[in-house]
Image: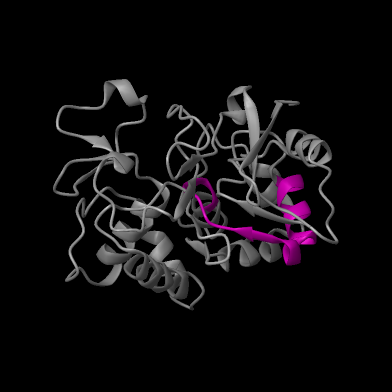
């Protein structure tokens, strides 16, 4: 029995199945963790969602920004972008079922046995584990409620840019979502710069990768994330496990076996 954390699949169904064959995934014994962004960019978003839904009892999945974008488009509160490749999901007879299931997924997954915390983009440095779990649950409750359409309608935006415990309503929820699903760099006061998408070497003046700022989480806690394909780090790098290795851009899809930190990678099969 083994547990594998897998980087951003982004609709690359053929590569996902190739990776699972490579690691000899046994759905009756093993478990899979997914860092989010399981759809979009690649051409197999529908196949990925159907497969994950089929094995849902064997997986832990956190939401990424592309997954939330699908929910917004599917619910008619955001337009389909020219670069979106999940039209197959929208056209599928089971689209409502798949999107409802996706909407139930968390923003954060923590397993004390592995002492591992998984989110899509990382962990906002001003939050300790308790705070991160609490604010993630706030948004998860909102997404699962009858108010989810109203929230998805105001999901997009870069403000507020810094955390304040006194934030309320949709502004508070939007910041929480941005921190968990879009964060890359921020300044020492905790202000997010959500426009920057380049590599580690060219961060805007005064801004730093989120993991270079002092963390409020025990250094023995493993932080598993994806989202930033241009952030190239060894796996692991201290307590960091950056698993987005750019499969959607023709590079590799990565899996991490949590029992022994062994890394498995396969080239894109798309």
Task: Judge whether residue 52 is colored magenta.
Answer: yes
Residue 219, position as x, y percentages in the image: 37, 52
Query: As rendered, which of 97 and 192 lies closer to the eye?
Result: 192
Viewport quadrant of the C terminus: top right
Residue drawn at 21 percent across, 50 percent down: 161
Q: Tell me, what colour scheme is on the image? A: one colour
Q: Which residues are magenta?
A: 46-67
List the single residue furthest toward the bottom. 146
Q: Main secondary structure of the magenta part?
A: helix
Quarter of the figure with residue 18: top right
- In the rendered image, the vertical position of residue 24 relative to residue 266, given as above or below: below
Query: As rendered, which of 150 and 238 lies closer to the eye?
Result: 238
Residue 59, position as x, y percentages in the image: 69, 60
- In the rendered image, the vertical position of residue 75 relative to residue 166, given as above or below: above
- In the rendered image, the vertical position of residue 176 relative to residue 66, given as above or below: below
Residue drawn at 51 percent across, 74 percent down: 144
Residue 22, position as x, y percentages in the image: 81, 35
Residue drawn at 85 percent across, 61 percent down: 28
User: Is 183 on the left or on the right of 61, as rendered?
Assistant: left
- In the rendered image, the vertical position of residue 172 relative to residue 52, given as above or below: below
Residue 188, position as x, y percentages in the image: 15, 44
Task: Judge whether residue 110 is colored magenta.
Answer: no
Viewport quadrant of the N terminus: bottom right
């Amino acid at each position: 029995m083994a547990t594998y954390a897998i980087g951003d699949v982004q609709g690359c169904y053929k590569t996902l199945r190739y990776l699972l064959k490579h690691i000899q995934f046994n759905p009756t014994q093993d478990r899979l963790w997914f860092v989010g962004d399981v759809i979009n960019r690649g051409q197999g978003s529908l196949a990925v969602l159907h497969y994950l839904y089929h094995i849902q009892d064997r997986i832990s999945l956190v939401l990424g920004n592309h997954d939330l974008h699908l929910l917004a488009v599917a619910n008619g509160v955001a337009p389909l972008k020219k670069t979106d490749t999940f039209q197959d999901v929208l056209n599928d007879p089971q689209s409502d079922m798949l999107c409802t299931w996706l909407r139930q997924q968390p923003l954060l997954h923590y397993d004390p046995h592995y002492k591992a915390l998984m989110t899509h983009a990382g962990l906002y440095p001003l939050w300790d584990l308790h705070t991160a779990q609490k604010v993630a649950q706030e948004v998860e409750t909102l997404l699962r409620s009858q108010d989810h359409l109203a929230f998805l309608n105001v999901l997009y935006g870069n403000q507020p840019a810094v955390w304040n415990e006194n934030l309320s309503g949709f502004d508070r929820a939007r910041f929480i979502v941005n921190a968990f699903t879009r964060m890359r760099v921020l300044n020492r006061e905790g202000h997010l710069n959500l426009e920057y998408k380049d590599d580690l070497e060219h961060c805007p003046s005064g801004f730093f990768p989120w993991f270079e700022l002092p963390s409020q989480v025990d250094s023995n806690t493993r932080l598993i994330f994806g989202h930033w394909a241009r952030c190239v780090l060894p796996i692991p790098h201290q307590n960091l496990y950056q698993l987005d290795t750019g499969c959607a851009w023709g590079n590799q899809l990565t899996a991490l076996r949590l029992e022994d930190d062994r890394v498995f990678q396969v080239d894109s099969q798309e």
